Image (cartoon, grey):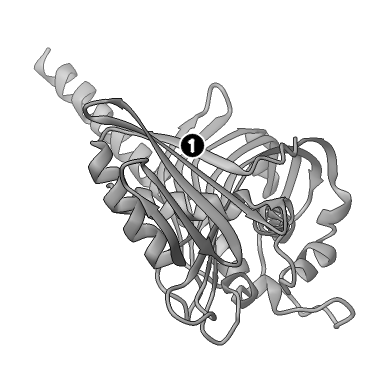
Amino acid sequence: MQKKIRIIVLAVIFLFGFCLVRDFLIKSLIGTVVSSVTGAPTRVGGLSLSVIRQSVRISNFRIYNPKGFPRDILVDIPRMGVTCNLGAFITGKIHLKQLELDIKEMGVLKNKEGKLNVDSLKIAAQKPGEKKKKPAKQPAIQIDVVNLGMGRVVSRDYSVEGQPAVKVYDINLKKTYKNITSVQQLVALIITEPLKAAGIQGAKVYGASALAGVAALPVMAAFTITGKDYVEETFNVTMERAYDAGLQAIKTAGKVIGEDRSGSTISAAVSGARVTFKLKKLSQNSTQVTISAHKFGLPQAETASGVMYRLKERLK
């Protein structure tokens, strides 16, 4: 009886160890392949594989800035779900029936020399019309459907004088793509589609999208342009603290034009836009903050969101 118990215990330990090693190897493979395509550090937080369901769940997948830029997150994907054909692995091919990606945030950074972090990625090195370099050997891959969700793009421009200009684009975009046949296509899609949705121009990395054929892939899109000129958040702080933090955030972002503490309002100029900061007391320790921005009469929600982003950093 004791011998049987020992065998069962050893079997459980073996299976547990096997699962740990298996998941570690898969995580390492994903990180290595993506890093080889981008030239940037990549980390996979957690991974769960179900053989019965033929599915994989990945958490905290992150691509960091390439060499020469601060070690900040370039792409943050908290959740990634995969439905795969495990039988294809026998033939040495990766076949994913469906891939679900939810990008929480993408950080676009322009350094003092005016160079974008996304343009320093390896996939941006090759230009349209150039002879394609022989890529490093990678596993054959086929992805039938990719559902891509994009939250926001945070842009920081260090090429301007003084503090960096911060703009936040809340794009909240969902798109579906078909027939991805290379890791390069997938990475180009993840990098360039949020930039396009945010309307960020001049990035050389767009060439990677054309070379990979990503531009012809989208088959369904759902994106609503609201034309909002403001952002609104509620913070669990007193109105006095929210006002002081907002004042400092605005001074960092631009120039204060007028203050009215009794009226809980601040007016300012930020990145060429006229910004209005307003507070509303909801309770003793709850304050609603509304920030609006206009430039030449047009809404500048990304500038308002940038000020709100700085405010959140101060109220953490």
Along the horizontal axis of the image, is 297 left or right of 23? right
What amino acid is labelled 1 in the image?
Answer: Glu
Where does the image place residue 56, in percent across and percent down from the top left? 53, 34
Classify residue 241 by image quadrant: top left
Q: Nearer the viewer, residue 131 or 250?
A: 250
Where does the image place residue 142, in percent across and percent down from the top left? 75, 46
Where does the image place residue 210, in percent across and percent down from the top left? 84, 64
Classify residue 296 by image quadrant: bottom right
Q: Residue furthest top?
A: 1
Q: On screen, 138 above or below 94?
A: below
Q: Nearer the viewer, residue 211 or 261?
A: 261
Q: On screen, 311 above or below 88?
A: below
Classify residue 55 by image quadrant: top right
Residue at mark 1:
232
Task: Please tell me whether mark 1 sits on a helix, a strand or a loop.
Answer: strand
Where does the image place residue 266, in percent across and percent down from the top left? 42, 51
Along the horizontal axis of the image, is 298 left or right of 230? right
The answer to whether residue 217 shows anywhere in this view is yes
Circle 1 Cα neighbour tier, 10 Å, few/some/many (<14 / 14–19 / ≥20):
some
Residue at 34% of width from left, 56% of height from top? 247
Q: On screen, 262 above or below 127?
A: above
Q: Nearer the viewer, residue 9 or 121?
A: 121
